[in-house]
Amino acid sequence: MTIASLCIGTADQDRSLESASHHRAKAVVLRDAPASAAAVPALRRFAADAARRRGAPGEAVDRLSIVVTELVTNAVLHSASPDVTVAIEFDDGCMTVEVRDSGSWQSRWSPRHIPEDDVSGGRGLELVRHCSSWWRVFLWVFLSPAGSRVVACLAVVAPTG
């Protein structure tokens, strides 16, 4: 099972899925939350705790926390979605995180500018790019109002020694 094929619904509790692959089992954890400011720290803690339980080193947990924070913040601020879902797949030295919303795409009236040093926003996707091996945005703008999802893969380097 790949994270891109997950059907993410709503639930009050974390969900954990184990799927057998020809190499070894993959673990996928999910959490849904109302798309509000409170979702950002709650989903960041959820992601960090899940990564620690899977034995991810501190540096990888920190990068995952940054990615989840930025992607959930974008969903809360820019999607007009009532909810946001985080799914994380742990497999073979990678953490693949997906953040999905059910809102509609909000067009920008002005082009994005490089933020000034004292501006607190505008750097989220740049941080995601630096923290991940790769990332993709999927918008269902023309097909349906089904929302958007962003998937990012973070390499996990095991501690040596």
Image (spheres, rainbow, N blue to C red):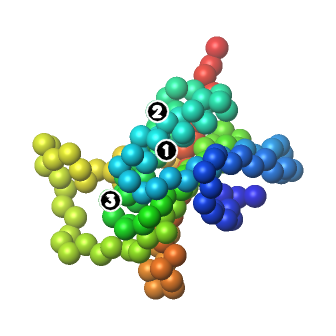
Residue 57 tag number:
none
**Disc 1 + disc 3, Cβ < 8 Å:** no
For residue 138, side relative to residue 16 (left or right) = left
For residue 78, side relative to residue 55 (left or right) = left
Report the Cα–Cα distance between label 2 and label 3. 22 Å
Seen at 62% across and 55% down, the residue is 11
Seen at 64% across and 46% down, the residue is 14
Which residue reaches farthest front?
A: 12
Residue 53 % position (x, y): 65, 30
Seen at 51% across and 83% down, the residue is 144
Label 1 CA crowd tier, 10 Å (few <14, some 14–19, many 20+): many
The numbered mark, 1 or 3, whose residue comes first in the sequence reads: 1
Seen at 60% across and 29% down, the residue is 52
Instruction: Please tell me whether mark 2 sits on a helix, a strand or a loop.
Output: helix
Instruction: Say which residue label 1 marks.
Output: 43
Mark 2: amino acid: Asp
Q: Can the viewer see residue 128?
A: no
Report the Cα–Cα distance between label 1 and label 3. 15 Å
Residue 41 % position (x, y): 42, 40
Mark 3: amino acid: Leu
Mark 1: amino acid: Leu
The numbered mark, 2 or 1, whose residue comes first in the sequence reads: 1
Give the mark toward the camera: 2 or 1. 1
Say which of 150 and 41 sits in front. 41
Instruction: Say which residue label 2 marks.
Output: 62
Instruction: Say which residue label 3 marks.
Output: 77
Instruction: Please tell me whether mark 3 sits on a helix, a strand or a loop.
Output: helix
The numbered mark, 2 or 3, whose residue comes first in the sequence reads: 2
Say which of 8 and 11 sits in front. 11
Say which of 36 and 116 sits in front. 36
